[in-house]
């Protein structure tokens, strides 16, 4: 409220002198307070004062952020690159997904907001080079000994990471563990915070509902069952030093789980995901759970603020845009339809009424295939 208003509210007949005195007093008080505050922030003032003051701080307009907070606060203002590690096989099914994934990685990395997206390696656990060596940076590792995976090819993933971490030169401090059926829809920042990795919580990974089984590998004396996160190994952004510790345990727990009939029956195709969650807990590592890390169409209908589309589920719809999950739709996109060959270029777009997540997925696949050379040859 300004001076004339105060006068009217008071209802008095005094002149303007008291109001002017009040303004003058306020200005004087402000100047004194500012002088004292600036001296404190400069660490005592003068040319030799430490602390940097308001201007030198360059980060906060009032008080400089403490050093420990800058380090733990996500590294704002400094680049914290992560290396993308994509485990894959040389099968046609894996190859076409890797090509689409790498195409969108490069597109998002090139944007100004993609500064944290560092190097990229396809960790190929087929034991020999394939036709994508010149297109995608690749590190070849050995598969498990014949028969060891018992037909569960994903069991090769932890073993692949163990070999890659031991033998490869990785410049980045952090690693993003990714999969071929991931598509970046926008640049991904480093979501990890120092020794706290970031992961996506899966609704179907429920350690508390399988406590009896989990306790075979994570005994009660190690801590509560809630120490086992509801996650898999991907997507996860984690410090390389932490993953170097977890990976061998992850491999051993995966093999133990597969050899145990009860565990194998209970966990099925997500066994290796549970193994990573248990291995992390055994090393005292818990993850920041980021639901915005990725979406999974068709159940997640909107893009929202997500970074990745995970197209693990088939998308089946009627021509009226009604989901017919479990029944082959009049329109469909399912990666499993393309086991032995890549999908054709220019896939038919979904009918009206289909959610934006599915529409975006198909459009992004179409853009990638339109720009990737020799696509129809199924490299």
Image: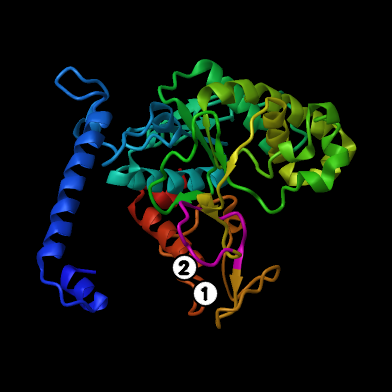
Q: Which mark is residue 100?
A: none
Q: Which residue is mark 2?
A: 359
The answer to whether any part of residue 153 appears in the image is no
Whether 308 is among the magenta residues is yes
On the question of residue 258 being in view, the answer is: yes
Which segment is the magenta one? Answer: 300-315
Q: Residues within 10 Å of mark 2 (few under 14, many from 20)?
A: some
The residue drawn where x is 28% and y is 40% is 62
Residue in the image at 65% along x and 41% along y: 232
Pointers 1 and 2 in contact (C-beta within 8 Å): yes
Return the x and y of residue 21 as percentages of the image width and height: 13, 58
Q: Which mark is residue 354?
A: 1
For the residue pair 104 and 216, the one nearer the viewer reads as 216
- At numbered mark 2, what does the secondary structure look like: helix, strand or loop? helix
Which quadrant would the N terminus be assigned to in this image?
bottom left
Is label 1 in a helix, a strand or a loop? loop
Seen in the picture, residue 173 relative to 290 is either above or below; the reply is above
């Amino acid at each position: 409220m300004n001076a004339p208003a105060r006068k009217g509210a008071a209802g008095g007949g005094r002149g303007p002198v008291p109001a002017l005195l009040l303004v003058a007093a306020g200005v004087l008080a402000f100047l004194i307070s500012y002088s004292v505050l600036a001296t404190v922030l400069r660490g005592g003032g003068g040319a030799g004062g430490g602390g940097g003051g308001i201007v030198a701080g360059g980060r906060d307009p009032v008080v400089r952020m403490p050093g420990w907070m800058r380090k733990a606060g996500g590294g704002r203002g400094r680049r914290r690159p992560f290396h993308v590690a994509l485990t894959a096989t040389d099968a046609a099914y894996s190859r076409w997904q890797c090509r689409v994934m790498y195409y969108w990685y490069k597109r998002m990395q090139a944007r100004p907001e993609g500064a944290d997206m560092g190097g990229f390696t396809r960790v190929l656990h087929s034991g020999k080079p394939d036709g994508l060596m010149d297109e995608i940076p690749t590190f070849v590792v050995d598969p498990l000994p014949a028969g060891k995976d018992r037909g569960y090819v994903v069991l090769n993933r932890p073993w692949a990471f163990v070999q890659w971490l031991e033998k490869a030169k990785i410049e980045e401090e952090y690693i993003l563990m990714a999969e071929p059926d991931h598509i970046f829809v926008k640049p991904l920042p480093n979501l990890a915070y120092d020794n706290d990795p970031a992961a996506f919580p899966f609704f179907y990974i429920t350690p508390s509902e399988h406590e009896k089984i989990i306790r075979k590998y994570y005994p009660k004396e190690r801590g509560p069952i809630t120490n086992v996160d509801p996650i898999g190994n991907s997507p996860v952004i984690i410090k390389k030093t932490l993953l170097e510790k977890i990976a061998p345990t992850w491999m051993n727990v995966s093999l133990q789980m597969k050899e145990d009939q009860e565990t194998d029956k209970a966990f099925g195709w997500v066994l290796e995901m549970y193994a990573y969650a248990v291995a992390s807990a055994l090393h005292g590592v818990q993850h920041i759970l980021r639901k915005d890390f990725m979406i999974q169409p068709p159940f997640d209908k909107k893009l929202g603020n997500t970074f990745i589309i995970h197209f693990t589920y088939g998308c089946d719809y009627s021509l009226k845009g009604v989901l017919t999950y479990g029944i082959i739709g009049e329109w469909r996109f399912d990666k499993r339809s393309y086991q032995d060959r890549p999908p054709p270029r220019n896939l038919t777009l979904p009918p009206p009424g289909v959610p934006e997540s599915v529409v975006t997925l198909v459009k992004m696949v179409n853009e990638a295939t339109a720009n990737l050379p020799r696509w129809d040859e199924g490299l």
